[in-house]
Image: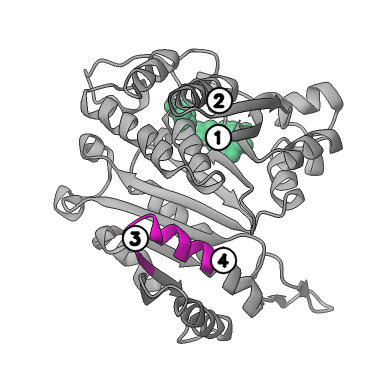
């Protein structure tokens, strides 16, 4: 297969971690007979320095012309004084909205070797945690009409969803579940919210197309408890924008390892943008101590969701799991007194396990 990938290294540790992910992608391509071409795109602080804006039209255009985007991270203290629409993070919003990405996937996995980093009790995570939060990104209360009354003493934010918006993300969740344990949990507040009732109705209709995937519903207050009480219940957790914003952060925190968490933002075709959930970690930039695994796992998600290369995606995930079980650690995931290695060395250990 031929893959055209836009690389957005960004700022801080971004270039270091994207470099390792590219090494892994190149090795996978070599082993499995694919060809990959890359075009590098400036976004965030580096783009502000060069072009005075966090994302140029040209950069967006290059990203849009690719099959998928792999992004490191943007931002840092150098640009903290920059205001409003010129802030580095605006590049992310520009890419997400400019590319029409409406579906956010955030896996949360607790690897047995790193279980001690989880703030949850060993008994709670003993059965394993491997869940995927599917969050709607472009609708709901964040994008609804908002305002205040004339004297400013009351305010409103409107939450609105259409059946089409719900159905398209429901399909993404069911498709993702087919590559996993085939279970979708819709998280909502259907006892109170009409939008939630529309979600239940619409997802149930879509579920009829996916007879091989089981479906259940959970109120968001209960889901936030179950994530810390019985996280093993979840396979794919499907939810609207605001609930997803909150629950995806909660799901990440229960793993305890920010340097390990990947994400994908998708739209209806195979195009997607893939990035670690962490930021540009300016405190460790250029020190060869950043953990590249979140970005490497983001590259695995790219192979799975944009190129349907499940075998190749699994090969990367297995190489990461095997490196961890052999004791490979970067500084952030090393226990006290445990030996650790740098960013590039960690990339090499994963590369070696790809074959
Ligand atoms: P951060 O995620 O960059 O860092 C938080 C802590 O986690 C730091 O101690 C950092 O060293 C550590 N860390 C993060 N990623 C790591 C990795 N791969 N390996 C080892 N340690 C890692 O969050 P922050 O400090 O709040 O933000 C720093 C900058 O990043 C800010 O400018 C912020 O706006 C930006 N940011 C960007 C994104 C993004 O590009 N998606 C997301 C969040 C924050």
Q: Measuring 31% from the left and 34% from the top, which residue is drawn there?
A: 318
Question: How far apart are labels 2 and 3 at the CA level?
Answer: 28 Å
Query: Is the residue marked 1 within 8 Å of ligand 1, measured from its CB?
Result: yes
Q: How many marks?
A: 4
Q: Residues within 10 Å of mark 3 (few under 14, many from 20)?
A: many
Q: Nearer the viewer, residue 194 or 284?
A: 194
Q: Position of residue 24 (x, y in %)?
A: 46, 24
Rendered image quadrant of residue 353: top left
**Which residue is identified by label 3?**
235
Q: Earlier along the polypeptide chain: callout 4 or callout 3? A: 4
Q: Based on the displayed image, in which of its 4 quarters is residue 12 positioned?
A: top right
> Are the residues at dot 2 and dot 1 in contact (C-beta closer than 8 Å)?
no
Q: Badge 2 is on which residue?
A: 18
Where residue 191 appears, as percent x and y from the top left, is 45, 87
Residue segment shown in magenta: 171-184
Q: CA distance from mark 1 to mark 4?
A: 26 Å
Q: Tell me how far mark 2 sits from mark 4, CA to CA.
A: 28 Å
Instruction: Give the labeled residue for mark 4.
Output: 169
Between label 1 and label 4, give the one nearer the viewer: 4
């Amino acid at each position: 297969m031929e893959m055209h990938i836009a690389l957005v290294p960004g700022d801080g540790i971004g270039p270091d971690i994207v470099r390792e992910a590219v090494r892994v992608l190149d090795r996978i391509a070599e082993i499995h007979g694919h060809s990959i071409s890359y075009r590098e795109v400036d976004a965030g602080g580096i783009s502000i320095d060069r072009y005075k804006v966090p994302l140029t039209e040209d950069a967006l255009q290059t990203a849009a012309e690719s099959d998928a985007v792999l992004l490191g991270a943007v931002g840092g203290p150098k640009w903290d004084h920059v205001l409003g629409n010129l802030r580095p993070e605006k590049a992310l919003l520009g890419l997400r909205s400019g590319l029409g990405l409406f579906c956010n996937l955030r896996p949360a996995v607790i690897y047995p070797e790193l279980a001690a980093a989880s703030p949850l009790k060993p008994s709670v995570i003993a059965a394993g945690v491997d869940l995927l939060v599917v969050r709607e990104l472009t609708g709901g209360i964040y994008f609804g009409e908002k305002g205040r009354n004339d004297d400013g003493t009351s305010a409103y934010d409107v939450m609105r969803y259409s059946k089409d918006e719900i159905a398209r993300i429901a399909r993404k969740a069911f498709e993702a579940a087919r590559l996993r344990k085939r279970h979708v949990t819709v998280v909502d507040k259907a006892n109170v919210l009409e939008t939630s009732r529309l979600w239940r109705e619409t997802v149930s209709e879509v579920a009829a197309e996916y007879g091989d995937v089981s479906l259940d519903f959970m109120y968001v207050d209960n889901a936030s408890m179950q994530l810390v009480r019985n996280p093993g219940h979840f396979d794919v957790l499907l939810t609207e924008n605001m609930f997803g914003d909150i629950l995806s952060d909660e799901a990440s925190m229960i793993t305890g390892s920010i340097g390990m968490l990947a994400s994908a933002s998708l739209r209806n075709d195979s195009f997607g943008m893939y990035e670690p959930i962490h930021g540009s970690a300016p405190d460790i930039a250029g020190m060869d101590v950043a953990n590249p695994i979140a970005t490497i796992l983001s590259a695995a998600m790219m192979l799975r969701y944009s190129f349907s290369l499940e075998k190749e995606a699994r090969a990367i995930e297995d190489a990461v799991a095997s490196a961890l079980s052999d004791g490979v650690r970067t500084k952030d995931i090393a226990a006290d007194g445990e030996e650790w290695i740098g960013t590039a060395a960690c990339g090499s250990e994963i590369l070696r396990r790809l074959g």
